[in-house]
Image: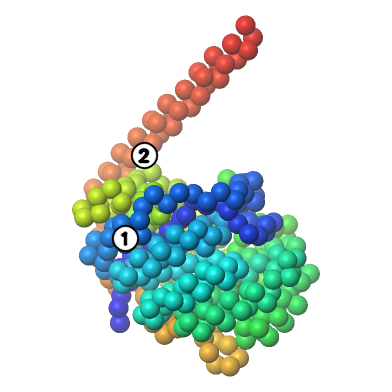
Amino acid sequence: MEQMKRFIDCSVGTYACNLRCHYCYVAQNYLFTQKVPEFKYSAEHVGRSLSKERLGGTCMFNICASGETLIPHEIVDYAKAILAQGHYVMIVTNGMLRKRFEEFAEFPEDYRKRLFFKMSFHYLELKRLNKFELFFSNVKLIKKMKASFTIEVTPSDELIPYIEEMKEMSLRELGALPHITVARDESKSDYPLLTKLSKEDYIKTWGQFDSMMFDFKISVFGEKRKEYCYAGNWTWTLNLLTGTMKQCYMTNYFANIYTNPNKPLHFVNIGHGCKAPHCHNAHAFLCFGAIPELQTPLYAELRNRVCTDGTEWLQPEMKAFMSCKLENANEQAQPKKDVLINWIYNIIYRTAWVARTLLKKVDKHYKSNEIHK
């Protein structure tokens, strides 16, 4: 079986969206805009920069925008270019854009087998807009094209009165209950649960969906990771627009993979230097094995469902690849140089932060003096 060399979480800096979910991280920070960013790099350049040879093997890519991922057409082209390199691709979407799914359906069969859609089931928005038929028809199209998918619900207090009707609809239309994620309040520095319920009531309310994804995410939510982490090497984050590669969401070491696509990449383990209050998207990073000493479920177990008709949401190729652990394709080395590199970048970052802060204060001081003249 083909082993997974790296997991790469790709962001797309677009806040354009066709829904207005109240629990959305973008909504929490008042960032909604319909502007689509410029994609400066061609799909061919992106694919060449992410070749198997350069990355050391077959990788799993996750593509997610701040708004709706599939609004820019370039995402279809980028996904195809990455699949052409022999990698696997996951795309986060609200499942509303029929034209995009029709474009994916035109991909070669070998590409579609390595394609996975994380369909966010925004029940209240679909109900408000009367778009359930569109959503479920797109799910059927994904099944027809023999790609893989999962259905995921973001739990919110406002959704609680509709739980029973949502479950009934899911069983009728999908043959299985949706998986449940865990919502966090990004307006606060420690990213607490986005709910007015106690943690005990929150678990009792949303645990009824028998979702292994929810069970795992809630089990590690708020737990500071202190183990040695291979983020920055086995896993990393990538801005698809700019090519900026970072160890993880809250780290200082970075590089640009688009600048010299023919040159080898340098990987630096984050080690014990994680700055996050808890592991963001732990269900992916930890279940793929960024911290090998942790015992976690397989990622496939968090995404798959067996339907009432015996079919599964994951196709065999995708299910097998999602069942990989990164330690099987990588060496558990902890170079001392990584500690030094992280330390140097932290010093540079802190120095730059102090300089920016002082400049802002000086600028504010002079502006205040101008006003009072």
Q: Secondary structure at mark 2?
A: helix
Vertical arrangement, residue 292 with respect to residue 249, above or below: below
- The one nearer the camera, 237 or 241, is 241
Q: Residue at x 54, y 75 (%)?
A: 150
Indicate which disc residue 44 carries: 1
Q: Secondary structure at mark 1?
A: helix
Query: Which residue in the structure is indicated by mark 2?
Result: 346
* x then y, percent, for residue 245: 36, 51
Q: Residue at x 63, y 56 (%)?
A: 24
- Left of 265 or right of it: where is 43? right
Q: Quadrant of residue 87?
A: bottom left
Q: Residues within 10 Å of mark 1 (few under 14, many from 20)?
A: some
Circle 2/circle 1 CB separation < 8 Å: no
Vertical arrangement, residue 270 with respect to residue 358, above or below: below
Residue found farthest to the bottom: 309
Q: Residue at x 59, y 11 (%)?
A: 370
* x then y, percent, for residue 221: 56, 60
Q: Disc 2 marks which amino acid?
A: Asn
Marks 2 and 1, how far apart in space? 34 Å
* x then y, percent, for residue 70: 52, 63
Q: Residue at x 57, y 71 (%)?
A: 98
Q: Is residue 253 visible?
A: yes
Q: Is residue 272 visible?
A: no
Q: Quadrant of the C terminus?
A: top right
Q: Quadrant of residue 201?
A: bottom right
Indicate which disc residue 54 carries: none
